[in-house]
Image (cartoon, rainbow, N blue to C red):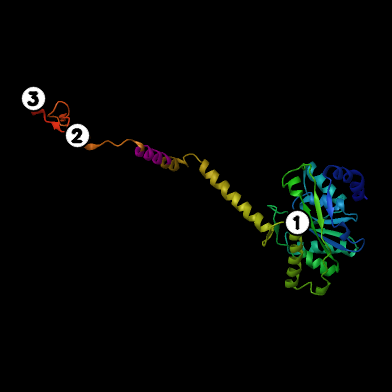
């Protein structure tokens, strides 16, 4: 009940007015029966805008952190996700992954629409990352079609870490249903599951226009975090008292060397003064260019 109140009365009309979402391929969503919406994941708001433009109710598998937050914000977030019927999942893998799979299958076996992000987390840089095979396994066990969905512009409207989204137009492209019934009974074959998942990700790449990266988004996030920590350690080391003395001395030595190279050179031969002559040892120059020695000048 709360889901439809939010969608049609409270939140939905306001979001449609402000963000004016456009939709391509809405006719591809079946009017009844189970179906999986497999979407790219760019922003927190993906889980809000996609259900907004679909006539049928969409249940998403949401990370458990959204349901266990503390403080006023945490409680409000948990209430919102529970109210709109989202299901908490533990993404730590192993038994937690099996529990998420069972939760998704319950939705599909009720004949409803399930929303899932095959990448498993938000893209760290706007590119499309390798998909997890859970979507393939659910599609085979439930015997339902998979619809690839491309969210367009949500990462610009609400980047990671931004609470209040920027008012701009949002787009959603829904691809044609993918039928994997040819693999019926092969849900335990990991090669089949990988093949199905890769086919879904390929369709997502075509719909979204994103660059595809053949690695998991979580692995890329770990690399980014490790690089950030390394950079932070370097900055801390540089900020220690006396840490930059050596570099400063090297810079000063280099600067002094440049100054020495710029000083004008003195001709040693011209600077050699003959103390026996009062004018530095030089005679008078004759019109023909010859110097007259001093003794000749005296005799003249």
Q: Is residue 300 magenta?
A: no
Task: Tell me the quarter of the image containing the C terminus.
Answer: top left
Q: Residue 272's x, y, as percent?
A: 19, 34
Decide which of tag 3 and tag 1 comes sooner along the chain.
1
Instruction: Kindly state the secondary structure of the residue where label 1 is placed.
Output: helix
- Tell which tag, 3 or 1, sits nearer the viewer: 3
Q: Residue 35's x, y, as percent?
A: 86, 63
Q: Residue 109's x, y, as percent?
A: 89, 65
Which of the 4 image quadrants contains residue 201?
bottom right
The circle on residue 208 is: 1
Instruction: Kindly state the secondary structure of the residue where label 2 is placed.
Output: loop
- Name the residue that disc number 2 marks: 272
Disc 1 to disc 2, how far (Cα)? 82 Å
Q: Which residues are magenta?
A: 251-261
- Tell which tag, 2 or 3, sits nearer the viewer: 3
Name of the residue lying farthest toward the front: 288
Q: Is residue 260 magenta?
A: yes
Q: Is residue 49 visible?
A: yes
Disc 3 to disc 1, how far (Cα)? 102 Å
- Name the residue that disc number 3 marks: 298
Please tell me which residue lies in front, 288 or 210: 288
């Amino acid at each position: 009940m709360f889901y439809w109140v939010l969608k049609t009365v409270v939140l939905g009309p306001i979001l449609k007015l402000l963000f004016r979402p456009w939709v391509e391929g809405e006719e591809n969503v079946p009017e009844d029966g189970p179906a999986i919406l497999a979407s790219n994941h760019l922003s927190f708001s993906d889980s809000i805008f996609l259900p907004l433009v679909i006539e049928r109710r969409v249940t998403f598998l949401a990370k458990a952190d959204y349901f266990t937050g503390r403080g006023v914000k945490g409680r409000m977030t948990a209430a919102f996700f529970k109210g709109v019927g989202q299901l908490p999942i533990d993404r730590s893998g192993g038994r937690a992954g099996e529990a998420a799979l069972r939760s998704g299958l319950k939705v599909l076996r009720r004949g409803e629409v399930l929303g899932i992000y095959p990448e498993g987390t938000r893209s760290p840089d706007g590119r499309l990352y390798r998909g997890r095979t859970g979507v393939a396994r659910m599609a085979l066990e439930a015997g339902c079609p998979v619809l690839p969905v491309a969210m367009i512009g949500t990462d610009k409207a609400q980047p990671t870490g931004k609470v209040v989204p920027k008012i701009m137009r949002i787009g959603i492209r829904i691809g044609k249903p993918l039928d994997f019934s040819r693999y019926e009974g092969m849900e335990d074959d990991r090669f089949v599951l990988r093949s199905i998942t890769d086919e879904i990700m390929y369709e997502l790449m075509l719909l979204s226009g994103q660059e595809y990266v053949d690695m998991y988004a979580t692995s890329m996030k770990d690399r980014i975090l490790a690089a950030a920590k390394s950079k932070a350690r370097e900055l801390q080391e540089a900020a220690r008292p006396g840490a930059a003395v050596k570099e400063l001395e090297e810079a000063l030595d280099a600067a002094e060397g440049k100054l020495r190279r710029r000083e004008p050179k003195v001709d040693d031969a011209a600077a050699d003064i003959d103390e026996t002559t009062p004018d530095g040892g030089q005679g008078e120059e004759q019109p023909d260019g010859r110097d007259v020695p001093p003794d000749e000048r005296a005799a003249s």
